[in-house]
Amino acid sequence: MHSKFNFSAGPAALPQPVLKRAQAELLDWNGQGTSVMEVSHRGKPFMAVAEKAERDLRDIMHIPDNYKVLFLQGGGRGQFFSVPMNLAQRGDLSQHLVSGQWSQIAVAEAEKYMSAEVVAKTQTRDNMLWVPNQEHWDINPEAAYFHYCPNETVDGIEINWVPKSQDVPIVADMSSNILSKAIDVSDYGIIYAGAQKNIGPSGLAVVIIRDDLLGFARKDTPAVFDYQQQVNNDSMYNTPPTFSWYLAGLVFEWLKEQGGVQAIEKINTQKAKLLYSCIDASDFYGNKIDPSNRSKMNVTFQLADSSLDSLFLEKAEEAGLVALKGHRFVGGMRASIYNAMPLEGVEALVSFMQEFERTNA
Ligand code: PMP
């Protein structure tokens, strides 16, 4: 049973069964008489955890054999510089689609190492934020890579198509929608994600990289962030964040038990539909994202009368619905409904919103 429903954008709610299992195993993990945090990363017991986590992730995402999977430190932003540093020897031009804050910051980091070119940006169309599709822009075939963020966590903008880039490798920051739906990994050169939404604790980053993109790092790339070095050392060039890796493994096991990404995608679709329908059903609430770009993970909405914002948040909290305040850059509300948010959480939020409207309209 949930005592509260946590709509935090990240670090975000983790599945309750995962937390319970971690709790049960905390003091005596795997019959070791210690916690998983206190054993060598190179010992057999932890190596088994590390390998199983990778195997399960490969299973869940159908990751082809010609891709390596890394469990690294530095979160999502750590990849904003790791990507350009690791691909720099392929050429000094990177191409970017900017659909929000995160993909914009990725450009600023890439600019330190490459000529980073923005090919397109989110536009306002009929008063809604919309990501221009590829009829409106091109990727330079000379580019070392093309970077975009399929789900922008702050505005709640999701891109539901994969850019066509001919031979230019596509790099996707999937921090906030990885594992939320079925994707074809082979569409991408690199997929990366900070863990703190659909994977596990913050600080960890999962990187999925196609073999042929290894070996292009700048000479001054720090070894810890050098993909090839980390591949050569099974992500253990330095001591990995073992507890986070273990917890990610528990989340992957949980996701498999739920029926994998196909099953969770159905529930995610149902959750998002329910919430957007509630927002659309009245003028009391509004959403500024073009319907084709509405995120299924981060649902942003505004109260038509923003002077009610703090009352809304206060009453929501009283009802056990927490962390609904929108990002400080955009204001309003944001309900992050990642995989771990059960349908009942969204139903509770919708009931609350309807009731709040009845009493305050
Ligand atoms: N990319 C996206 C899409 C994000 O949502 C975030 C964080 N919320 C980041 C990157 C940055 O991640 P981190 O804070 O782990 O560096």
Image: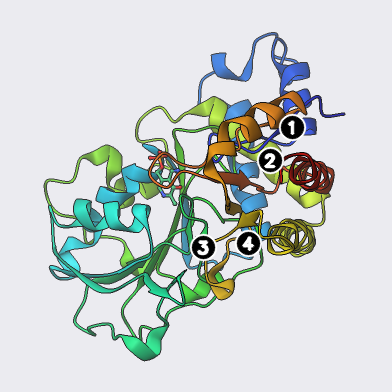
Check the image and tell me how it is coloured: rainbow
| Mark earlier in primary sequence (1, 3) | 1
Residue at which label 4 appears? 61
Secondary structure category for the residue under label 2: helix
Q: Which residue is mark 3?
A: 288
Query: Which of disc 4 and disc 2 is earlier in sequence?
Result: 4
Residue 251 badge: 2
Q: Is residue 1 left or right of residue 234?
A: right
Q: Looking at the picture, how far across and down is residue 44, in whole percent?
A: 60, 28
Residue 209 lies, with reference to residue 360, above or below; the image says below
Could you say whether the residue bearing mark 3 is in a helix, strand or loop? loop
Q: Which residue is mark 1?
A: 18
Q: Is residue 304 above or below residue 71?
A: below
Farthest bottom residue in view: 135
How far apart are the alpha carbons under marks 1 and 3?
35 Å
Mark 3 or mark 4: whose residue is earlier in sequence: 4
| Badge 2 or badge 3: first in the primary sequence | 2
* Mark 3, other Cα within 10 Å: few <14 / some 14–19 / many ≥20: some
Residue plotted at (62% across, 43% down):
53
Q: Quadrant of ligand 1?
A: top left
